[in-house]
Image (tube, helix red, strand yellow):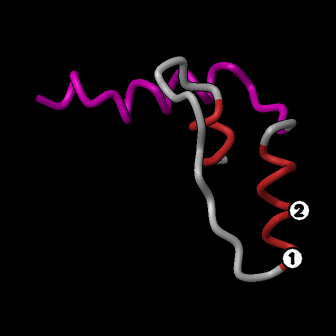
Amino acid sequence: LALAWCLRQRAVSSVIVGASRPGHVDDNVAAADLEVDAGLFARMDEILDPVAHR
């Protein structure tokens, strides 16, 4: 979920991830196609907005 959120941020041009097992690579790739309710991402944006927390 965190990786999927990062991939959808306009200010992010790329996401660098690590994997210690082959299964982790599969999970990371799957994040690109993860379908999540837009409301959840909107709520995550509210919580994680660095400007709002100043």
Magenta segment: 34-54
On residue 49, the disc is: none
Q: Is residue 41 magenta?
A: yes
Q: Quadrant of residue 32?
A: top right
Q: Quadrant of residue 24?
A: bottom right
Q: Secondary structure at mark 1?
A: helix
Amino acid marked by disc 1: Pro
Q: Which residue is pictured at 82% across the width and 65% down the height?
A: 25
Expressed as whole percent of the image width and height from the top left, the position of residue 6 reads 57, 37
Q: Secondary structure at mark 2?
A: helix
Q: Is residue 44 magenta?
A: yes
The reply to whether dot 1 and dot 2 touch (C-beta < 8 Å) is yes
Amino acid marked by disc 2: Asp
3D distance between C-alphas at marks 1 and 2: 7 Å
Expressed as whole percent of the image width and height from the top left, the position of residue 49 reads 33, 27
The residue singled out by tag 2 in the image is 26
Which quarter of the figure is the C terminus placed in? top left
How many numbered marks does the figure carry? 2
Q: Which residue is pictured at 63% across the width and 26% down the height?
A: 8
Q: Looking at the image, which residue sits at the far bottom?
A: 21
The residue singled out by tag 1 in the image is 22
Q: Looking at the image, which residue sits at the far left?
A: 54
In the image, is 7 to the left or to the right of 49?
Answer: right
Q: Which residue is pictured at 18% across the width and 31% down the height?
A: 53
